[in-house]
Amino acid sequence: MKASSRLAALAVVAGLALSGCAVIRDQQSAGAYIDDAAISTSLKAKYVESKTVSAGSVQIETLNGVVQLSGFVKSAAEKAEAERIARETKGVKEVKNNLQIRP
């Protein structure tokens, strides 16, 4: 590898290391993005395990620990259970329940 190539590679690595908290999405740090993805994944797994909540009908968006639920459910009980599970999930700061009850 030429010295100029090594220097360029080193500059890229240094830039990435220094920008470890760089903004990725909507003023969200890399760490917060990973945390939000973990919350969404954990919540989806809990919905799959639930006998009340239809995991395929509920969409989950997480941003900075705030979970937004959307989609359609069959009953008020399913809507309430989806919210309860979300609120009890580690890392969740707030839940916005926009689930609609399908008649």
Image: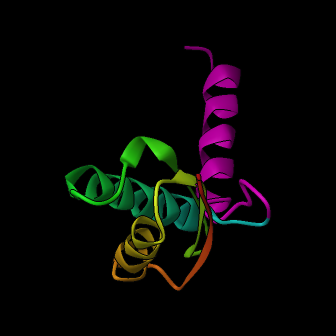
Residue at image x 48%, y 71%? 76
Q: Position of residue 93 (x, y in %)?
A: 52, 85
Q: Is residue 10 above or below residue 3?
A: below
Residue at image x 37%, y 73%? 81
Q: Position of residue 25 (x, y in %)?
A: 74, 55
- For the image shown, how many numbered marks are present on the structure? 0
Q: Position of residue 75 (x, y in %)?
A: 46, 63
Q: Position of residue 72 (x, y in %)?
A: 57, 51
Residue farthest toward the top in the current orientation of the protein = 1
Name the residue nearer the viewer: 99 or 27. 99
Residue at image x 58%, y 55%? 17
Residue at image x 69%, y 41%? 11
Name the residue nearer the viewer: 31 or 8. 31
| The residue stretch that appears in magenta | 1-26
Name the residue nearer the viewer: 101 or 9. 101
Left or right position of 51 against 86? left
Q: Which image quarter holds the N terminus?
A: top right
Left or right position of 53 against 21? left
Residue farthest toward the right in the current orientation of the protein = 26
Give the main secondary structure of the magenta stretch: helix
**Residue 95 lies in magenta, yes or no?**
no
Q: Is residue 71 above or below residue 42?
A: above
**Residue 19 lies in magenta, yes or no?**
yes
Indicate how the structure is coloured in the image. Answer: rainbow
Splitting the image into 4 quarters, where does residue 26 fall? bottom right
